[in-house]
Amino acid sequence: MISLDLIMLSENLAAFMEIDGKFYKMQGFSKLDILSVPEVYARKYINNDFKSVTVTGGDTKISYAFDRMKNFKVHDVLSRIADLNLSGDKATVKIVLVDFDNEQDGKFYAIKQSFAVVCKDVRPEDGFLDYFGMFISSGKASEGAVTSCDGFETADFTEKRRGILCD
């Protein structure tokens, strides 16, 4: 039993990829759709009219497509992974998803997570070299906030502190 929720990135939700310790806006994409795929355990017991369902895990998948453009750092990283058939840690990136509708004190709510990059196809179309693939979550997500000094071309992520001594 799988429940699927699809979220399309918009002007109020943006993605940033970490490159050399800085998060760069993921721009120039013709597709960047988020799919949340929970794993559930369902059981129906005798003499009950309902099922007992528990969420046991899950992952996030982000489908992507982009026309390869020069001087886009994110495109450079993704096309290198695809062109060289990289795998393992060399094909893993960190992405921050930012909710621009959720702002507090000039900081915007964000979730950071590692993703495996799975390139599905590279082909020339309409005079451009197009890349198609998927990011699949790898590891636990962390909550935090982002700020920017350049109009959100890049972003700085600060992880939310946890614990009894944190504010």
Image: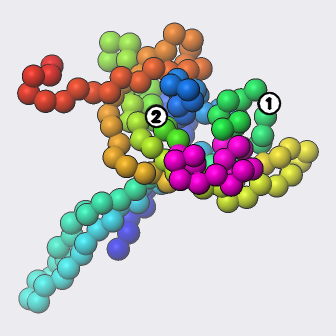
- Inspect this view and state whether residue 108 appears: no
Q: CA distance from mark 1 to mark 2?
A: 23 Å
Residue 149, above or below 91: above
> Which image quadrant is residue 120 in?
bottom right
Marker disc for residue 70: 1
> Which image quadrant is residue 156 in?
top left
Crowd tier of the residue under label 2, counting other residues whose Cα lies within 10 Å: few below 14, some 14–19, many 20 or above = many
Q: Quadrant of the C terminus?
A: top left
Q: Amino acid at mark 1?
A: Lys
Q: Position of residue 166 (x, y in %)?
A: 14, 22
Query: Which residue extends farthest bottom?
Result: 46
Q: Amino acid at mark 2?
A: Val
> Magenta segment: does it hold 83?
yes
The residue drawn where x is 46% and y is 34% is 96
Between 25 and 88, the one lying in front of the other is 88
> Which image quadrant is residue 26 in?
top right
Q: Secondary structure at mark 2?
A: strand
> Magenta segment: does it hold 41?
no
The residue at which mark 2 appears reads as 96
The residue drawn where x is 29% and y is 68% is 40
Q: Secondary structure at mark 1?
A: loop
132 horizontally vs 97: left or right = right
The residue drawn where x is 65% and y is 34% is 74
Magenta residues span: 78-92
